[in-house]
Amino acid sequence: MSSSNLQQYIDPSGLAVLRGVLDEVGFAGTEANADIESKEAAPRFILKEFHKGNSTRELLISAIKRRGESSHGELQTPQQSKNQAVDRWDNEGGR
């Protein structure tokens, strides 16, 4: 039997980029405060983006932020979620 699941190699520098992006946007590392579902979805998303050719830190961060800003708000970064909460509080007359 052959497998249709093709393994794609990522070198150590690519892994470092992926890990750095997850840390920077708040889905990994000691400062991560995202919910568990987002912590599981974020690596899958950036790995797909990486394999599409978005292999730099800047492109990956941009892609994940765009996804968080989408109409469904899927995979918002912890900072995007916090900003929305603060904006909502401010709009409701918070001081």
Image: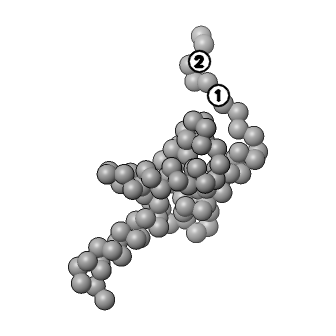
User: Regarding mark 1 in the picture, which secondary structure is present there?
Assistant: loop
Residue under the point 57% across and 36% down:
52
Residue visible at 35% across and 68% down in the picture? 84
At mark 2, the secondary structure is loop
Q: Residue 25's image quarter?
A: bottom right
Extreme residue toward the left, this view: 92
Q: What residue is pinned by disc 2? A: 3
Where residue 54 appears, x then y in whole percent?
59, 43
Look at the picture and state if 43 lies above or below 20. above
Q: Going by the image, does 87 lie left or right of 46?
A: left
> Closest to the observer: 48 or 69?
69
Left or right of 90? Residue 26 is right
The reply to whether the C-beta atoms of the residues labelled 1 and 2 are less than 8 Å apart is no
Task: Residue 21 in the image: state x and y as whole percent.
Answer: 61, 56
The image shows residue 33 at horizontal and vertical percentages of 50, 66
Residue 59 badge = none
In the picture shown, does residue 70 fall above or below 52? below
**Is residue 28 or residue 63 the one in the foreground?**
63
| Mark 1: amino acid | Gln
Q: Residue at x 33, y 74 (%)?
A: 87
